[in-house]
Amino acid sequence: MPTFEFQGRDAAGKVVEGLRLASNIDNISTQLIREGITPVQIKPVQMEEDAWKFIDDWLKGGRISADELGIFSRQMYTLSKAGVPISIAIKRLAETARSRSMTAALNGIGEALEAGQDLAAAMQRYPKVFTPVMISMIRVGQSSGRLDEAFLHLNQYIELESSAIKRLASAMRYPMFILTVMVAAVFVVNTFVIPTFSKVYATAHITLPTLTIALIAISKFTMDYWVYLLCLFLSGLGWWIYYLRTPEGRLWWDTVRLKIPIIGLLMKRIVLLRFTQIFAIVTKAGVPLLESLTLVAQAINNSHAQEEILGMREAILRGKTLTQSALMVDFFTPLEIQMLTVSEETGELAEMLQQMSSFYEREVDYDLKRLNDIIEPLLIVCLAVVILLLAFAVYLPIWDLIKLAHT
């Protein structure tokens, strides 16, 4: 999303300026007018990134973990609720930050606050640290005078994101271990074991089994042309990574992932879980509906789902209700549509979304456990079959040699 620099005047005639993320200039104008600021000038900002800036950012400490952001949001909630001025709170937290990147970001925010910028605009200068969802929550908290609650909602959002990542990583740890062992076993046998035994078999006058002949041929081909195979593999991997980074490639892969048997259902429920969780948090934080849908679409790591959610936003802009726009999306079942209908009628959208997120959280946990129960035995069987085939290919000729020696 592009960055815009704005200049305007508030109700008292004071000049207000800063940076904001938005899809276009009209959205910036709408946000400012809603906050009581009359826009005077709005222009896009070209974010310059050169090699020296990249090196400087790298030297300042690398990535900032979700745990550190969670600690920051909890501390800011406590300090702002206690009435500590924001600029002083930021300076205190900069002194105790864990990473150099966080220290640099907080020091920069503190300097921007002293220069007259508001907190949301100052945070917006660090898009690699604070996402648009976080910045929007803080902006709404500022305009409503409930900044402490904004930091509380921000902490809930960060903890949900961190919990989802840890859950998926934990579920995939054992399958990845089995796959690594399988690949390592094939590599060791193909590179060291088969060539050694093939020299022995070459001097023996025995008929080799078909499996052994095939493995010797594969091993010889690999050893003779490993440079070309490595180049081919790296080229294919590079092309695949590049393709997935293009909008078309990412959209294709994200659509395919949702249609894979068993895994596709899990991916769809993860998308629904993130949708309901983030939508509930930004709605409770007071973010307007249209902006909430934009932020939710940005926070969901699936291009197909992003297009569907942005389609809902466009439908609402054309005069549809939230429920009517949800009917156009293939993610929602009749149960979710009914719950959204009830929430619109009662005006309790955030509470209903929280209930839906709790339901999907249980479903995702169950699906992850069921997926492990299915994948783990299959991987173990595959590993056993691979090792058995390798053992037969290596030792069957040895048994023939032993028989030949006894005759």
Image (tube, rainbow, N blue to C red):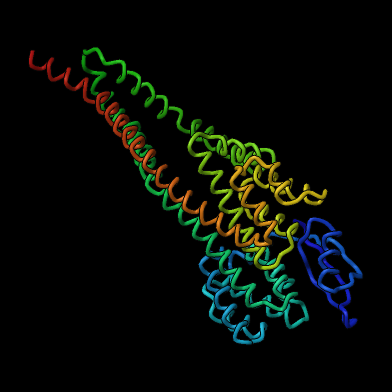
- 11 or 67, which lies in front? 11
Q: Which residue does the image show at 77% across and 81% down from the upper left?
A: 115
- 115 or 228, which lies in front? 115
Quadrant assignment, res 87: bottom right
Indicate whether 63 appears above or below 403: below
Residue 350: x %, y % from top left: 63, 62
- Can the viewer see residue 239? no
Give the side of residue 319 with respect to residue 152, left or right: right
- 177 or 12, which lies in front? 12
Give the side of residue 327 with respect to residue 34, left or right: left
Q: Which residue does the image show at 7% across and 16% down from the upper left?
A: 406
Give the side of residue 140 with respect to residue 233, left or right: right
Q: Which residue does the image show at 45% across and 32% down from the upper left?
A: 226
Indicate whether 227 appears above or below 287: above
Q: How many marks?
A: 0
Q: Which residue does the image show at 63% across and 75% down from the upper left?
A: 149
Quadrant assignment, res 119: bottom right
Residue 341: x %, y % from top left: 67, 51
**For the view shown, which residue lies furthest in the left direction?**
406
Residue 3: x %, y % from top left: 78, 61
Indicate whether 256 appears above or below 68: above
- Can the viewer see residue 326? yes
The quadrant in which the C terminus is found is top left
Indicate whether 35 appears above or below 128: below
Residue 184: x %, y % from top left: 36, 39
Quadrant assignment, res 251: top right
The quadrant in which the N terminus is found is bottom right
Give the side of residue 45 with respect to residue 182, left or right: right
